[in-house]
Amino acid sequence: MDDRFLQWKKQCMSKIDLSKKGSVDEDISDVVAFINDSENYFTTSSCSGRITLIDGVSEVQKKDCNWLFVTHQKCQSADVVASLARAGGDASFRFEPFVLHVQCRRLEDAQLLAVRSTHCLEVPLTHEGQQLVSGDYVSFLVEVANQKMEENFRRMRRFYDCLQSAMCAEQCHSPKVTDAKAEKSVYKRRRRQAQEPECDSHKDDTSSEEDGALESGLHLLL
């Protein structure tokens, strides 16, 4: 399974980015790089969050939709209004939070990244090319979407901090790290025993028992 996972990861990392933008969004690039540097994960797609205006919205045939406006930052209502004038069908204004699609080595690894959010916005603005709302309402929607984008960036930073802490804790309790600590403990004990006077046999026995318990405790953490 490990060999297969590494092969999948290598193949995915070598593929050409087929997204509309053709590259990882700058605001999520650190998170993506951190995940891909881990031996247990790799990303298959990502988005730092976006505000869009799409004509002919269809979840089934999104590739056939007309993207009138898209940004991964906060936007200006004038830009949205200008883009809305080009709508010829059913156009919807959307805010979508950051998203990460991640391939995981094991089920336990997937549980570490099991995160969901309902921090979204979707409002229809035209029907068959006819605008359904006023310019003031579009400005209001843009203000709401910009607030959501700010909150999105805060959540993404918080997610990154929590992910780093969780992975660090996981690595500290991994068999490789634990075995290394145990080996270091044994080395220190043997070195200390070699330096202690041979006449104090009772002290040596006590020290040996305590260190043996410590070694056993370390192995219990596996």
Image (cartoon, helix red, strand yellow):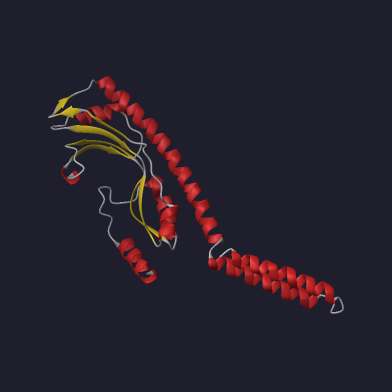
The N terminus sits in image quarter:
bottom left
The residue under the point 45% across, 53% down is: 112
User: Residue 202 or 70: which is nearer the viewer?
Assistant: 202
User: Residue 29 or 209: which is nearer the viewer?
Assistant: 209
Work out which residue is located at the far bottom of the displayed protein and give it. 198
Give the image location of residue 97, x and y in percent: 35, 40
Quadrant of the image occupied by residue 3: bottom left
Q: Is residue 91 above or below residue 216?
A: above
Work out which residue is located at the far right of the displayed protein and give it. 199
Give the image location of residue 152, x and y in percent: 40, 38
Report the label total: 0
Q: Is residue 18 above or below residue 187?
A: above
The residue under the point 63% across, 69% down is: 182
The C terminus sits in image quarter:
bottom right
User: Residue 26 or 13: which is nearer the viewer?
Assistant: 13
Give the image location of residue 11, x and y in percent: 31, 65
The residue under the point 25% across, 21% down is: 135
User: Residue 132 or 179: which is nearer the viewer?
Assistant: 179
Give the image location of residue 157, x and y in percent: 46, 43
Quadrant of the image occupied by residue 39: bottom left
Position of 173 compared to 25: left or right?
right
